[in-house]
Image (spheres, rainbow, N blue to C red):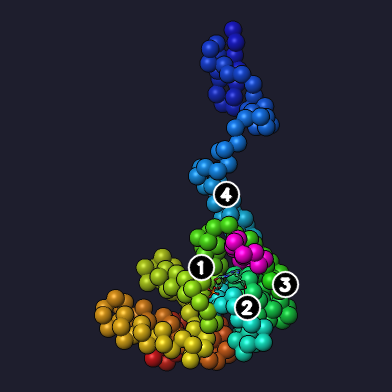
Amino acid sequence: MRSKSKGPVTLRRDAVDEGTTDQRLLDSRGPSDWVHTDPWRVLKIQAEFVEGFGALAELGPAIGVFGSARTPRDHAFYAIGEEVGRKVADAGFAVITGGGPGAMEAANKGASQAGGVSVGLGIELPFEAGLNDYVDLGIDFRYFFARKTMFVKYAQGFIVLPGGLGTFDELFEALTLVQTRKVTSFPVVLLGVSYWQGLIDWLRDTVLAEGKINESDLSMLVLTDDVDQAVELMVRARDEDLPIPPAHRAE
Ligand SMILES: C/C(=C\CNc1ncnc2c1ncn2[C@@H]1O[C@H](COP(=O)(O)O)[C@@H](O)[C@H]1O)CO
């Protein structure tokens, strides 16, 4: 009687199939179009989560720093980004950025040169930029949503430098997750009063006034030019588990 075992499964008579699982795995002659299908993509997505969680699980307290990929190295906000990275690292946090150029590079530079943990969560883009030179622990993601999960899972607060669409996306993702209680509250500081004031005014005078957000949503945001104040807020939230003090909230 023909009989075959496949793991816990026993096959007999006509149920017996040809070859072994290993043979099928190692055979390169079959169709390969399945690598372009969604089930295969799901496995790649899973792999990104596994790699990300594996690399960051033991990171310790960390602050996410967002900001424009286009901030030139000779711009004042590049220097401020370096100061943020350095002071956040000096306060005992790892710095997590998008790993790209501009404000991200500045924050990674400050953190790395201060001897801190400088993390970059890069993203595959059509215009290849690669991880900046100051990323000491880098992970490259294919999928934006997997990468964004890493920011909110491993950062305990966010400092947001002036930026464009990518920065807005990351900022509003963080705010939405707090608003919908998908994450417990964390401090969010907008650094650069003159850059961000217009957004705060619009949020208060239009969005809040029209009842599209609550006062508590707006009060999640702290607006300042003072890097020390931004870092102090992160430290207080970590050490004292304090809610954001009302005096620091955006007017
Ligand atoms: C524009 C150029 C490269 C872009 N490279 C990026 N690498 C990593 N992360 C990026 C990149 N661009 C955007 N991001 C993410 O969005 C935020 C900045 O976006 P913005 O539109 O510039 O504000 C940033 O925090 C990243 O996480 C070539 O110079």
Q: Where in the figure is residue 152, as x and y percent of width and height?
A: 51, 68
- Give the magenta range: 120-130
Spatial distance from mark 1 to mark 2, Cα to Cα?
21 Å
Q: Does residue 55 sit above or below 216 in this rendering?
A: above
Return the disc, 2 or 4, that comes first in the chain's sequence: 4
Ligand 1 closer than 8 Å to label 3 CB: no
Quadrant where the C terminus lies? bottom left
Ligand 1 closer than 8 Å to label 1 CB: no
- Which residue is at a point 55% across and 62% down the rendered structure image? 147
Count the labels in the image. Answer: 4
Characterize the local packing of mark 2: few (<14), some (14-19) or many (20 or more) Cα atoms within 10 angstroms.
Answer: many
Characterize the local packing of mark 4: few (<14), some (14-19) or many (20 or more) Cα atoms within 10 angstroms.
Answer: some
* SS label for mark 1: helix
Q: Which mark is residue 44?
A: 4
Mark 1, residue position:
152
Return the disc, 1 or 2, that comes first in the chain's sequence: 2
Residue ranking furthest to the top: 1
**Residue type, label 3:** Asp
